[in-house]
Amino acid sequence: MSTEAIAAERPKRNYNALFGLTLLALLVLLWVILSLATTSFASANNISNLLRQGSMIAILAVGQTFVIITGGIDLSVGAVVGFSTVIAAMLINAGVPVFVAILITLLVGVAIGLFHGFGIVKMGLPPFIITLATLTSLRGIGLLMTNGNSISINNDAFQEFSRNSFVGVPNLFWMVILVGIPAYIFLHHSRWGRYLFSVGSNAEASRLSGVNVQRTIYMAYTLSGLCAAFVGVLLASRIGIGNPTQAEGWELQAIASSVIGGTSLFGAVGSVHGPLLGAFILATINNGANLLNVNAFWQRIITGLLIIVIVYFDGLRRRGK
Amino acid sequence: MTSTAQELHPAPTLQPGRTILELNGLEKRYPGTHALKPVHLAFKAGEIHAIVGENGAGKSTLIKLLTGVMPRTSGEVIWEGQPVALATPHEAMALGINAVHQEVVLCRHLTVAANMFLGEEESRFGLLQQRAMVKDAQKIINGLGFDLPAHVVLGDLTIGQQQLIAAARATVRGTKFLIFDEPTAYLTRKEADQLFKLIRRLKGEGVTIIYISHRMEEVFELADRVSVLRDGTLVGTRNIAETNEPELVKLMINRSIEQIYHKEHFTPGAPIVETKNLSGKGFENVSVTVRAGEIVGLYGLIGAGRSEFVTTLYGRHKKSAGQILWQGKEVQVNSEHDAIRLGMALAPESRRDQGLCLNLPVGMNLNLPIYKRISSNLLISGAKEKTEADRQIADLRIKTPTRNALASSLSGGNQQKIVIGKWLAHGAKLFIFDEPTVGVDVGTKAEIYRLFSALLSKGAGIILISSYLPEVYELADTLHVFRRGKLVATHGFRTADHEDILTQALAEKQEKQGGQK
Ligand SMILES: Nc1ncnc2c1ncn2[C@@H]1O[C@H](COP(=O)(O)OP(=O)(O)OP(=O)(O)O)[C@@H](O)[C@H]1O
Ligand SMILES: [Mg+2]
């Protein structure tokens, strides 16, 4: 326990920003090393590719982070992505205008998130359980709807979008910015974001302060579902098919990105920039490993080790304060 | 919400003496417990109304009903002449009813300012006005005379300081009716004085106050009237001028106690533990000896290094220098496990975080340290588990429906009894009690002190940490005063007077603050 004087003098507000800078430095370091070690890394083509690879996980990680900050977890996001590709593909093939199809797909994501909120708040199910249930059943529903086949999307304009760039930057990466900036403002500068933290820190205290804890939980899962459905739309555009088994294991990558980005699985600690950087660090490692011809099995092992190392050091610093 | 702190300040227009809140047969049943039997009571606007009663008498339950935290079973609450439902905390707050709850319920990860405005953030165009909130929070804190920073993370403050923030917070919420549930339990004397000043000031502004405490002297210092609850029944309301401590105690526990501080003197035996110039995180150069049959008291402000000292002795933290001698031989205590094996037992200060498994049954909590003894090989003896738990529950008069009730469903004081009780059966040689009677009622305090004597008579030694001076003063054979991590003075049994000890504990701080002003 600290004495009064120490507690009063310690300025530790900028911890978040500092940690973000460390991650950024790590990312840059990785890029520098890979540019020196391989000839192809620094090519415009490869960088675009890397940004595309990282973007979708990054968006998932942002939604995931909202949930984790409240002390929960959303295991369903990968399945929601796969399911959303099916919804989008079916609607577009049925001749629904692309804009409307996207909107409906996003609404499906919202509905799934609301369902999670309902299960947690009203039925008292642990987040792990309800989202795990959705994970398996959504894949099943998608398979039923498609009879186990992939649906090719017959709309070129829709598919172009994910291949094109705007001022030299892939459209998919622009989508990260489109999600990231409002998410940042929401989490760090709005009262709703504040409530995510307060609920994760102490739900009882929040309730006694007049915070609507139930609504906050609904909100977190809804946003996560929304992000996942959005990623589903982007994925459908990128691969040009609707297939419920796509995005296998992406929930774990999203969680890993979030955790590498400094989010605490115990809740109440997290940011938006952290998970974004985390996602691109993971993408860089995969990309680099490919270029260096590292065995794909090793990639998984390296990713696992990296998670342990980063989270361990983060924890050390937090405790060492 | 765009209102500033100034607008949130209370502006009551009440004439004192008029009834502001009336309980009409208010009742609460929990499964298995009739916590509050129909209570009829009227609170007058602008009064300080103390509520006293044993642990589990229903005080906190009453507060929970009034603040909308729990729904009532039956009865009516009349607020300014109108019946009100009080179904949610939000509704109670909107009426101007606020509470500082028994356990600090704030968010440890958020800043002081964020906590103060939680649920009532200042924002413009949907954006939080973080700077403005920190500034306003600081203004309010300074205005109340608390010397605390608004921008730090709450978890970095001591529990006492957090409690002050909780109190300060209640004042920014347009409060007309403010309830304090044992606010001084974790406060140092100085902090308590600041709080009393705040309470008097609020009363001056016309706020009605309910003040719950187990400390009689506080009740007599502050209150205008006092009500006594016993077993969920309101057994009496008195004007403070027309009653006295023995009468209240008698009402509370239905018997009289001649002596709370039960003290027997034993001839001290051989040293059980000695520290020689022990240093570690938060304290340095502490040399203390505990002999069989004696109580060594450690007094000081919260954060003075007493808890750090004992937890280091107990192996939780690494010592940086010095020696620990156990029964005359130097030992290395590298973990709690080592400490327990040597024969130490520690009842920690923060029951929620360190002392209890809240969502486990009472019986399991009590038996946790002794499972080794009550199991043969791998299997726990069910019978022994039952008898041990039931014996403890009876000995300590822990108020619980059965040993299978969850620890979280017990009243605060009864939870504290578990924290203490679980070590009594363990048969250790050295007992370390860190703030053992926080939130414990008078009757139980007397019982706990008797238990101390029983332990001493069996040849154990006790280290007693308390921020409540009368307790260490009346019980300790040797009293050490800590200040800022150092042992600054040592007294025998009742050899110094209160004032001297207080000055020794505070001295440096007061000089420093004098200098700042
Ligand atoms: N959530 C709950 N579920 C079941 N029983 C409860 C619950 N909360 C309190 N009780 C029981 O209600 C009774 C009154 O508890 P309450 O917390 O009001 O006591 P109190 O007077 O505040 O005591 P203390 O001085 O120890 O804080 C106790 O017997 C307690 O075990
Ligand atoms: Mg209580």
Image: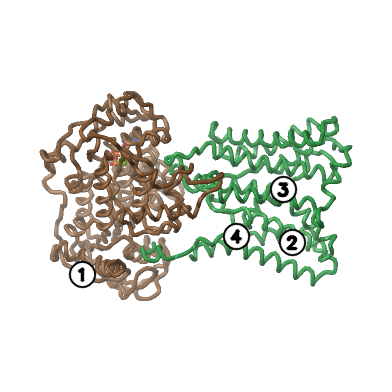
Chain colours: A green, B brown
Q: Residue B248: x, y in percent?
A: 15, 39
Q: Chain of mark 1?
A: B
Identify the residue at horizontal 34%, vertical 48% (top origin). Answer: B167
Dot 1 alpha-carbon crowd within 10 angstroms: few under 14, some 14 to 19, many 20 or more: some
* Distance between the alpha carbons at the discs numbered 3 and 1: 63 Å
Q: How many marks?
A: 4
Badge 2 amino acid: Ile
Q: Earlier in the sequence, mark 3 or mark 4?
A: 3
Mark 3 close to ligand 1, CB under 8 Å: no
| Numbered disc 2: secondary structure | helix
* Distance between the alpha carbons at the discs numbered 2 and 4: 17 Å
Q: Residue B466: x, y in percent?
A: 26, 58
Residue contact at pointers 3 and 4, CB within 8 angstroms = no
Identify the residue at horizontal 62%, vertical 55% (top origin). Answer: A259
- Horizontal side of residue A147 vs B81, given as left or right: right
Identify the residue at horizontal 85%, vertical 35% (top origin). Answer: A149
* Distance between the alpha carbons at the discs numbered 1 and 2: 62 Å
Residue that carries the numbered disc 2 in the rendered image:
A285
